[in-house]
């Protein structure tokens, strides 16, 4: 019985421990160069993330008044921070430090709004909004990120600040690939035409779709496994409760049988006692009343103050 109760207690604890739900602590932390800018949202948005990273790409273009030419296209990110009154946006992209984006090799610089020179398009305060409106942005995808992912993105940014630029192996696509990995996704491989910014961003969009599908499938499997564990725990609990009930019933039956046995024994004792009492008060057949009880005090039996004994005993003279 005690063992069944212990098993039931352990199973209850197992069921309680199956699911632990952690509520996210939201942080919005924007990092500019080597310093940090803290933007604290005053109102929560359950359906809209506080921080979003958007990946954008544009194809080859000829220089115009809006931006310089690009022989391979370009890809970059926009970090969006939701505040209590608006959305603050910052553009980050990997460029060669000297010359245009089409230069084959040169020391690289990861440009941000507060570090762009006056000749660079990202120096404009409305740059983030402008790049969204430009018709040459042919593909983009936005991902909500948490504080941990945001911190990893800025670790990538700081790493690439002093990174050499190479049009083949160390360029805006390589940078975007590492940023994408910082969001928790596995970046697509870069080979052949997939090295072109627009093609690579399309590959990123497909990777998001595929990996999100896999994550949903994994979540379904996890939930199914969790439900299985709960069901098994409940079944085990039910079996333990059944076993405990059987043990309790058997204990009650044993107690009942013991009580019945004691009752029978007590009744037997009572009957024997009554028989002895009856025998003690009954005058045996043919016995006679003693006329000299003092002489025959150890003969026969005393009944109601009168001694009786067998007629074989000699009478008193």
Image (cartoon, rainbow, N blue to C red):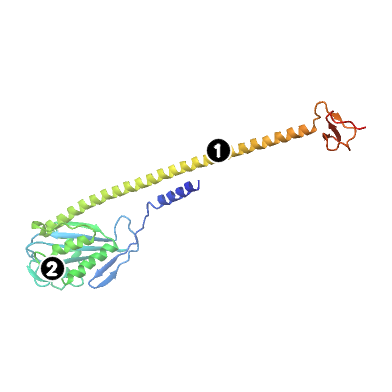
Q: Circles 2 and 1: CB distance less than 8 Å?
A: no
Answer few, some or many: residues within 10 Å of disc 1's Cα (few below 14, many 20 plus, some between 14 and 19): few
Outermost top residue: 286
Q: How many dots with numbers?
A: 2
Question: Which corner quadrant of the image does residue 112 belong to?
Answer: bottom left
Quick check: 251 left or right of 232? right
Residue 105 position within the rendered picture, expressed as x and y whole percent measured from the top left: 8, 69
Mark sitting earlier along the chain (2/1)? 2
Q: Position of residue 145 (x, y in %)?
A: 26, 60
Residue 111 in sight from this viewpoint? no
- 283 vs 235, left or right, is right
Label 2 Cα crowd, 10 Å radius (few <14 / some 14-19 / many 20+): many
Provide residue 150's location: percent of width, then percent of height. Answer: 26, 64
Q: Quadrant of residue 102?
A: bottom left
Q: Secondary structure at mark 2?
A: strand
Q: Nearer the viewer, residue 241 or 116?
A: 241
**In the figure, is residue 73 to the left or right of 288?**
left
Closer to the observer: label 2 or label 1? 1
Disc number at residue 95? Answer: 2
- Find residue 107 and report its horizontal and vertical position in percent: 11, 72
Residue at point 50% right, 48% down?
2
- Residue under circle 1? 253
Of residue 65 and residue 113, the one placed in the foreground of this image is 113
Name the one closer to the observer, 63 or 207: 207
Q: Residue at x 13, y 68 (%)?
A: 95
Distance CA(mark 2)–CA(mark 1): 87 Å
For residue 184, which quarter of the picture?
Answer: bottom left
Secondary structure at numbered mark 1: helix
Q: Which residue is painted at 20% across and 68% down in the image?
A: 157
Answer yes or no: is residue 270 visible.
yes
């Amino acid at each position: 019985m005690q063992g069944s109760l212990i098993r039931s207690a352990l199973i209850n604890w197992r069921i309680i421990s199956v699911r632990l739900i952690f509520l996210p602590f939201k942080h919005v932390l924007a990092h500019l160069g080597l310093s940090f800018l803290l933007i604290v949202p005053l109102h929560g948005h359950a359906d809209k993330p506080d921080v979003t990273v958007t990946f954008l790409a544009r194809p080859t273009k000829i220089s115009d008044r809006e931006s310089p030419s690009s022989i391979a296209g370009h890809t970059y990110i926009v970090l969006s921070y939701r505040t209590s009154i608006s959305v603050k946006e910052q553009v980050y992209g990997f460029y060669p430090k000297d010359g245009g984006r089409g230069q084959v090799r040169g020391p690289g610089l990861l440009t941000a709004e507060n570090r762009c020179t006056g000749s660079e398009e990202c120096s404009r305060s409305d740059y983030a909004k402008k790049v969204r409106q430009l018709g040459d942005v042919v593909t983009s995808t936005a991902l909500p990120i948490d504080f941990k992912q945001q911190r990893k993105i800025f670790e990538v940014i700081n790493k690439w600040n002093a990174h050499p630029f190479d049009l083949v192996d160390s360029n805006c696509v390589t940078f975007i690939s590492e940023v994408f990995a910082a969001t928790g996704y596995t970046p697509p491989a870069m080979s052949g035409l997939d090295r072109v910014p627009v093609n690579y961003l399309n590959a990123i969009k497909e990777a998001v779709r595929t990996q999100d599908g896999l994550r949903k499938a994994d979540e379904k499997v996890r939930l199914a496994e969790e439900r299985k564990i709960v069901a098994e725990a409940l079944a085990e609990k039910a079996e333990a409760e059944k076993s405990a009930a059987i043990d309790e019933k058997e204990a009650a039956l044993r107690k009942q049988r013991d009580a019945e046995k004691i009752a029978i024994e007590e009744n037997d004792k009572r009957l024997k006692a009554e028989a002895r009492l009856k025998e003690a008060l009954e005058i045996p057949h043919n016995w006679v009343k003693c006329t000299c009880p003092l002489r025959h005090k150890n003969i026969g039996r005393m009944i109601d103050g009168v001694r009786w004994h067998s007629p074989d005993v000699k009478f008193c003279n």
